[in-house]
Amino acid sequence: MTTCPDWNECSSTGGPNNCNAQAACNNTEGSFTCACNAGYSGDGIAECANVDECTTNAHNCGTQATCVDSTGSFTCACNTAGYGPLTDLTTCPDWNECSSTGGPNNCNAQAACNNTEGSFTCACNAGYSGDGIAECANVDECTTNAHNCGTQATCVDSTGSFTCACNTAGYGPLTDLTTCPDW
């Protein structure tokens, strides 16, 4: 009895398989099968069509990322509002807009930036009032009685703050913000 060796139809040296260009050939005893590569679907011979992983939810992009279909695959892109580049397919790290190394916040020079998840807020510094972005105006603590100068002292407004000065009639220099000692 004579046995014939199996002919590898999947051989890269011209095996006679008819698998699609986007399919893998699998040699079997006396035959072969074709299966579409990952990212494609079909019979492996006549058709291997691109699978849109984005519309079929066959992707693993995180909640801060958008799925972008590509031929035979997909990519994830971070949503632009406040997230940095992808650290992996699923994670978009919060971008610190308040970073001193060029964060894109538009806070006023007299405001503090507070980083939040995917965004930031601006709040005027002490001694200023406003929206923190377009305006942070000096607060006159003297006219608004937002000072703690004692009864023997006069409030003197300054940019972003105030000072207390002792009334000149019989009192020495301030020992603290509220006390003018008797001379």
Image (cartoon, rainbow, N blue to C red):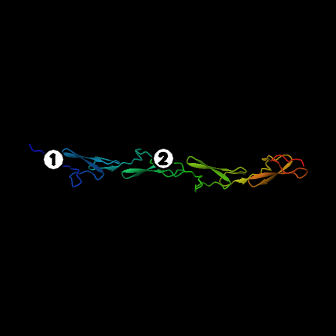
Disc 1 crowd, CA 10 A, few/some/many (<14, 14-19, 20+): few
Dot label at residue 108: none
Q: Nearer the viewer, residue 29 or 150?
A: 150
Dot label at residue 5: 1
Secondary structure under the numbered disc 2 in the rendered image: loop
Please state if 154 lies on the left or on the right of 131 as rendered: right
Looking at the image, do the residues carrying marks 2 and 1 touch, with CB atoms under 8 Å apart? no
- At a point 65% along the width and 51% down the height, the residue shown is 112
Q: Position of residue 141 (x, y in %)?
A: 78, 50
Q: Residue furthest top?
A: 1
Alpha carbon distance from label 2 to label 1: 52 Å
Residue that numbered label 2 is attached to: 91
- At a point 38% along the width and 50% down the height, the residue shown is 73
Please state if 9 lies on the left or on the right of 165 as rendered: left
User: Label 1 is placed on what type of residue?
Assistant: Pro
Please state if 117 lies on the left or on the right of 23 as rendered: right
- Label whose residue precedes the other's in the sequence (2 or 1): 1
Secondary structure under the numbered disc 1 in the rendered image: loop
Q: Position of residue 157 (x, y in %)?
A: 79, 53
Q: Position of residue 81 (x, y in %)?
A: 54, 51
Q: Nearer the viewer, residue 176 or 161?
A: 176
Residue 103 figure quarter? bottom right
User: Label 2 is placed on what type of residue?
Assistant: Thr
Disc 2 crowd, CA 10 A, few/some/many (<14, 14-19, 20+): many
Please state if 34 lies on the left or on the right of 66 as rendered: left
